[in-house]
Image: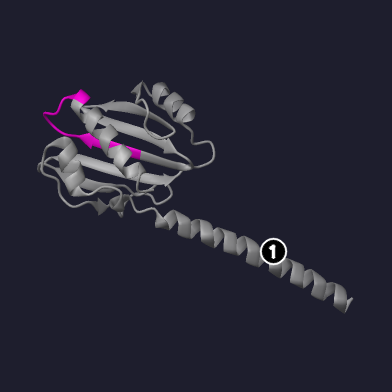
Amino acid sequence: MNRWFRTKFVVVMTAVMVFGSVGLVMAQEARKIDACGLLTPAEIKAAVGKEVTEGKLNEKANPLVGQPCEYKVDGYGVFSILVKTAAPGETADNMIAELKKRHIAVSDAGAVGDRAFFSSPGYGMIQLNTFKGDKYLVITMLIPGAAEAAQKTAAETLMKTALTKL
């Protein structure tokens, strides 16, 4: 009986250590994604043609959804980039379907990442949603006075730059 108990104990402890290690590695991997390290203010300025502040991680954002790095553009515009590991079922097709259900305009973004699309929530804001491997990135821009086409071009340029740093 004592030998059986020791064997069971060793098996259970081994399983706990293996699953605990895997969970720790996954948690550390999620923390390694630094949204503010993907783009510099100079890169954003070159793409949008306006002054850009240093990026700051939004500490108030839900860490399970992801914490975007936020920048101010020309004093009153906004730019942010979010990067996270895509959750199970979080695919481009599912995201597009959900946005269309909410009557948000969606359009193809072309050759950016594995799959990318724009969404236009309104008020001149555009979002470039991109899937690359197991990563899901979103660039959100609202630059008053900038044409939608110019914002989309800048977002594509910046997303391609960010993807090289993953």
Where does the image place residue 39, in percent across and percent down from the top left? 26, 47
Give the quarter of the image for residue 128: top left
144 within the magenta span:
yes
User: Is residue 64 in sight in this rendering?
Assistant: yes
> Magenta segment: does it hold 57?
no
**Residue 50 location (% of width, % of height):** 11, 39
Name the residue beneath numbered marker 1: 15
Nearer to me, 36 or 125: 36
Residue 65 visible in the current orientation: no
Q: Local crowd at mark 1 within 10 Å, few (<14), some, or many (≥20)? A: few
Q: Residue furthest bottom?
A: 2
Residue sitting at x 48%, y 27%? 93
Q: Residue 145, position in %: x, y?
A: 11, 28
Along the viewing direction, whichever of 22 and 59 lies nearer the viewer? 22
Residue drawn at point x = 42 percent, y = 26 percent: 96
Point out residue 159 in the picture as x, y percentages from the top left corner: 31, 38
Residues shaded magenta = 138-149
In-image side of 138 versus 40 (left or right): right
Q: Secondary structure at mark 1?
A: helix
Quarter of the image that includes the N terminus: bottom right
Apparent side of residue 163 relative to residue 122 in the rendered image (left or right): right
Residue type at mark 1 is Ala
